C-alpha cells in the first residue's frame, strides 16, 4: 500500500500512551476474570445441549416458563441464529439418562407448541468437561513455554522477553474480552487463542528480524531511532497482512453462523491486539531493557585467527 511506504511515524515517542492503554486493558481483563470469570461452554462445564426449531418466531420467555413448570429451573434458553431457532443448555443431571432427558424436554416443548422439531442434541459428562478445560489450559502453557525456548534460541534474551510479554499481553486481553462480554468460551475459542499466539509471534519475529538487521547496519544510531526506522520499514507488510487476514475473519464472523461466531470473534480481537502488541509491546519492552547494537554483535575471542590473517 503506497500510503504506508516510506513513512516516518514516531512510534517510539508514543510508547508511553501505548503503555497506559495496555495497562488499562490488562486491568479490565484481569479484574473481570477475577470477579466474573468466564462463561464456559458445554465443552468445559459438561451437561446437555439441545437445538430446537420452530415454524414461527418464538419468545424465549414462554419456553423458559414451560421448562420451569416441568422442573428444569436451571435451563439456559437462547436464540440460535434466528428467532425461530432455539438452543437449550442444561447442567449435568445425575439422576437422568441423557436420551430420556432430551425426550422429556421435547415433550415439554411440544406441549407448548407442537410445531417444534429437535435438530441436534449433545451431551458432555462433567468429568470430561473438567479434563478438557484442564488439558486446554495446559496446552496453552506448554505452547508459551516452547515459544519462549524457540525465541531465546533465535534472538538475544531482551528480544525473547519482549516477545513473551507481547504474547501474554495478547492472551490475557483476548480471554478478558470474553469475560467482559459474557460470550461463551468453548473449545473453538481456545483454538482461536492458540491461533492468536501463533499470529502474534509471527508478527513479532518479523519486527525483531528487521530491528536486528538495522542494529547491525546502523551501529552509531541510538536504539530508539533504529526501532523507529525498523517499524516504519515493516509497516506496509504488517498492515497488508492484518487487513487481508481481517477480511477472511470478518466473513466468518458475519456469514459463518453461530457455530463459529465465538471463534471468529476471538480471532478478530486477537488480530487487532496482536498487530498492536508487535509494534508497541514487544519493541517497547526490548527498548526498556536497553537493547543496543553491542548486544547483537558477536564478541571476538582472543587468539582466534581472523579471515585473511597470515599464520
Image (cartoon, rainbow, N blue to C red):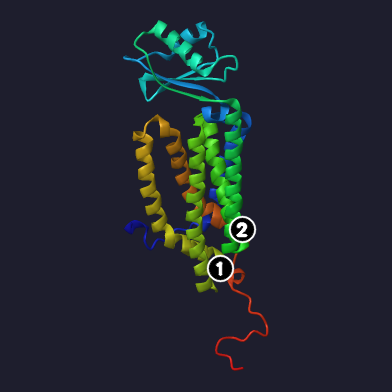
> Looking at the image, which residue is at 61% across and 45% down?
141
Residue 96: percent from left, percent from top:
56, 14
Q: Which mark is residue 288?
A: 2
Q: Gap in Å between the C-alphas at discs 1 and 2?
A: 13 Å
| Percent position of residue 147, x then y | 57, 54
Location of residue 29 (image quadrant): top right
Looking at the image, which residue is at 60% across and 55% down? Answer: 148
Placement of 161 over or under 221, stated as above or below: above
- Callout 2 crowding tier (Cα within 10 Å): few <14, some 14–19, many ≥20: few
Looking at the image, residue 78 sits to the left or right of residue 173; the answer is left
Label 2: which secondary element: helix
Where does the image place residue 192, in percent across and percent down from the top left?
48, 41
In depth, the one of 89 and 166 nearer the eye is: 89
Left of 72 or right of it: where is 302? right
Dot 1: element = loop
Residue 118 badge: none
Query: Would residue 27 be seen by someone viewing this image from the given angle?
Result: no
- Classify 10 Å Cα crowding around label 1: few (below 14), some (14-19), many (20 and above): few
Answer with mark 1 or mark 2, whichever residue precedes in sequence. 1
Q: Is residue 257 visible to the viewer in this orientation of the structure?
A: yes
Residue 112 relative to residue 92: left or right: left
Q: Quadrant of residue 116?
A: top left
Label 1 sits on residue: 222
Residue depicted at 57% across the width and 34% down the height: 132
Between 268 and 49, the residue placed more toward the observer is 49
Which sits in the foreground, 128 or 146? 128
In percent of the image, x 49 and y 17: which residue is there?
99
Q: Quadrant of the N terminus?
A: bottom left
- Residue 122, image x and y in percent? 47, 24
Amino acid at each position: 500500500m503506497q500510503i504506508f511506504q516510506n513513512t516516518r511515524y514516531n512510534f517510539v515517542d508514543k510508547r508511553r500512551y501505548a503503555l497506559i492503554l495496555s495497562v488499562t486493558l490488562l486491568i479490565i481483563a484481569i479484574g473481570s476474570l477475577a470477579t466474573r470469570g468466564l462463561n464456559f461452554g458445554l465443552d468445559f462445564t459438561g451437561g446437555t445441549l439441545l437445538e430446537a426449531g420452530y415454524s414461527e418466531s418464538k419468545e424465549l420467555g414462554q419456553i423458559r416458563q414451560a421448562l420451569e413448570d416441568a422442573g428444569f429451573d436451571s435451563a439456559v434458553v437462547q436464540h440460535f441464529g434466528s428467532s425461530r431457532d432455539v438452543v437449550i443448555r442444561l447442567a449435568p443431571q445425575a439422576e437422568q439418562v441423557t436420551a430420556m432427558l432430551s425426550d422429556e424436554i421435547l415433550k415439554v416443548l411440544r406441549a407448548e407448541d407442537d410445531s417444534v422439531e429437535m435438530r441436534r442434541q449433545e451431551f458432555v459428562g462433567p468429568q470430561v468437561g473438567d479434563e478438557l478445560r484442564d488439558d486446554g489450559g495446559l496446552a496453552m502453557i506448554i505452547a508459551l513455554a516452547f515459544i519462549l525456548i524457540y525465541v531465546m534460541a533465535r534472538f538475544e534474551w531482551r528480544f525473547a522477553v519482549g516477545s513473551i510479554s507481547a504474547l501474554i499481553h495478547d492472551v490475557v486481553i483476548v480471554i478478558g474480552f470474553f469475560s467482559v462480554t459474557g460470550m461463551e468460551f468453548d473449545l473453538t475459542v481456545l483454538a482461536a487463542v492458540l491461533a492468536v499466539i501463533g499470529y502474534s509471534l509471527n508478527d513479532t519475529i518479523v519486527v525483531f528480524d528487521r530491528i536486528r538487521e538495522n542494529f547491525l547496519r546502523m551501529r552509531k544510531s541510538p536504539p530508539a531511532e533504529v526501532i523507529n526506522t525498523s517499524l516504519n520499514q515493516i509497516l506496509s507488510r504488517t498492515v497488508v497482512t492484518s487487513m487481508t487476514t481481517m477480511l477472511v475473519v470478518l466473513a466468518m464472523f458475519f456469514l459463518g453462523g453461530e457455530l463459529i461466531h465465538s471463534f471468529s470473534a476471538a480471532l478478530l480481537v486477537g488480530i487487532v491486539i496482536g498487530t498492536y502488541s508487535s509494534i508497541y509491546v514487544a519493541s517497547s519492552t526490548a527498548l526498556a531493557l536497553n537493547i543496543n547494537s553491542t548486544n547483537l554483535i558477536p564478541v571476538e575471542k582472543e587468539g582466534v585467527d581472523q579471515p585473511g590473517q597470515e599464520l
